Image (cartoon, grey):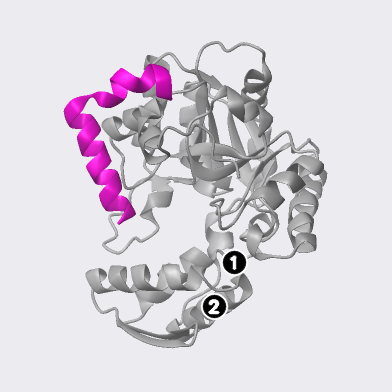
Amino acid sequence: MKQTILAAGFALFRATGLHRLVAPLTAGEGAILMLHHVRPWSGAAFAPNRLLEITPEYLESVLGALVAQGYDLVSMDEAHARLKAPRGGRRFAALTFDDGYRDVAQFAAPILRRFRAPYTIFVTTGFADQTAPLWWLELEDAVRLLDRVEISVGGEALSLPAGTPEAKAAAFARLYPSLRGLPEDEMRGLIADLLARAGGARDHAARLCMDWTELAELARDPLCAIGVHTITHPMLAKHDAATMRRELAESRAVIESRLGRPATHLAYPVGDPTSAGAREFAAARELGFASAVTTRPGVLFRGHAAHMTALPRLSINGLWQTPGAFEALLSGAPFALWNRGRRLNVS
């Protein structure tokens, strides 16, 4: 449903050019871009997490579009300073990469250097330690390996065909929201058990994420900053306050100890309203983070200066890798429509 709505919205903007007309009112001060993987597309027929990856060519297109539209490419420190400044200036964009994937160093960093674009990598310390699972990829692998998915979720026994790419996509789409609605420990346990029954390996962090040696090498680049993305990548709002604060504070301490540099910016894992809300925003502020970013979609307005631990981002989505889609998002027009004119979503 969400992808259908997005498709209809992009078609409307493409046909009417409405986003260009309203951009002076809706584009705000700038934007924080959210990315995950940057790598050549594999062509896989079953790829339910494709929204989390873009090609190097599309990253280059995005950066070129920002420059062409007169945006300054800035660090998170500079984005923070500009939001706090008494008067606005040129629009700006800050680039952020969640989780700490190896392909960011391999494919994204050379492009970012060519554009002299600062960027922040939000590191999950358990991924760098290769001790924390990437449950969304475990679920994908389990469904890929099975011809039928047999699982009980919330007391409901499911038997889902998964013999073709189309059936696998339908099974994943059925499972994902049901599992997400469970307590997180239960969700992770069910996915781990399903992957074990499918004969899959829990090796995603080792295969895909940078270790501390790789992170230290990349962090030598003056364009690169390292931010905090917790220890185990939990949906923080589903956990008690002590666990939530420990995930924030200890991951920051580990990063600063390992890399010998301050880590003052935070990204909430998953980052939607069911994963990070007022309690988490307050904790990030109390723990002294200069900023914290969500996955709530939107651009930045002056009012966000009073809510620096509840900042929205633009998801550079692998399902919509077109110049027109990015132009529409950057205009802020889709969010003005979606939020009925409300600029801030910080509660």
Can residue 212 be seen at all in this image of the molecule?
no
Is residue 238 depicted above or below 251 in this figure? below
Quadrant housing residue 150: bottom left
- Could you say whether the residue bearing mark 1 is in a helix, strand or loop? loop
Left or right of 221 on screen, residue 57: left
Q: Amino acid at mark 1?
A: Pro
Residue tagged 2: 192
Residue 332 visible in the current orientation: yes
Sequence-first disc among 1 and 2: 1
Vertical position of residue 242 compared to residue 51: above or below: below
Image coords of residue 167 (percent x, y): 25, 74
* The C terminus lies in quadrant: top right
The magenta-colored residue range is 1-26
> In the image, what residue type sits under mark 2?
Ala
Q: Residue at x 35, y 67 (%)?
A: 173
The residue where tag 1 is placed is 133
